[in-house]
Amino acid sequence: MMHLSNIVRPERDPQIIRTGPSSLDSSDKLARALGWFSLGLGLIELFTPHRITRSLGLEGNEGLVRAYGAREIGAGVLSLSVDKKAGLWSRVAGDGLDIVTLLTALREDNPKRDNVALALTMVIGITLLDLIGANATAVRHKENSGPRRLYRDRSGFPRGLQAARDNARQVSGKHAPALTHASHAR
């Protein structure tokens, strides 16, 4: 079976025969899904703000919707990066702005009030997903979990420096040059 990753590889590169289990857990997968959702929504808000404002009775706020689209794209990129936590928390903050904006459109004189209520319900649902993802990612990728390891006493040679020198002498078949006093001082 041809693996998709092999299509763009030159012939001399090693070929992927099969892949193993992913190291991504459910919080990483949720962050990825929300990141792609952000990118898609951001593009829609950036390029079709008139459709959004018209459907919500917010005509005249196209610039604001475009700005929200740029914010969504930024949050999406961060959510797909190694800094998922920052991306997801920026999504939560953005959801707060979206909720406040939608609440201003939930007035009696807005003929699109039902659309606003539906959009508000959807944003609250997405906010819950964002909160779940942000908290789960924060726990999974928590910095400073456990005692800090110190490696000051390690040389990088598992059996010590002298054993490494002895092995090098055996491999080369001759004695390695003696170290000068200056190199011992390092």
Image (cartoon, grey):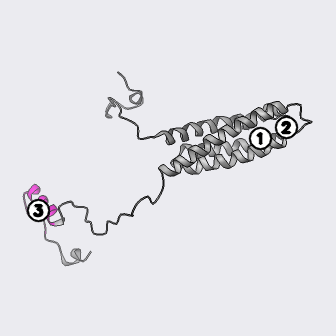
Q: Secondary structure at mark 2?
A: loop
**Is 65 above or below relative to 15?**
below
Q: Residue at x 47, y 57 (%)?
A: 143
- Determine which quarter of the picture holds residue 185: bottom left
Q: Secondary structure at mark 1?
A: helix
Q: Residue at x 80, y 31 (%)?
A: 115
Tell me which amino acid carries mark 3. Asp
| Residue ID for mark 2 | 58
Q: Nearer the viewer, residue 28 or 13?
A: 28
Instruction: Tell me the quadrant of the picture where the C terminus can be found.
Output: bottom left
Tell me which amino acid carries mark 1. Val
* Residue 41 drawn at (x, y percent): 67, 36
Sort mark 2 into few (<14), some (14-19) or many (20+) by Cα contacts within 10 Å. many
Q: Secondary structure at mark 3?
A: helix
| Residue ID for mark 3 | 166
Residue 42 is left or right of residue 101, and the answer is: left
| Residue ID for mark 1 | 65
**Residues under numbered marks 1 and 2 in contact, where contact means CB atoms less than 8 Å apart:** yes
Tell me which amino acid carries mark 2. Leu
Q: Which mark is residue 118?
A: none
- The stretch of residues the image draws in magenta is 162-177
Residue 37 in the magenta stretch? The answer is no
Name the residue at the right extreme.
Answer: 109
Sort mark 1 into few (<14), some (14-19) or many (20+) by Cα contacts within 10 Å. many
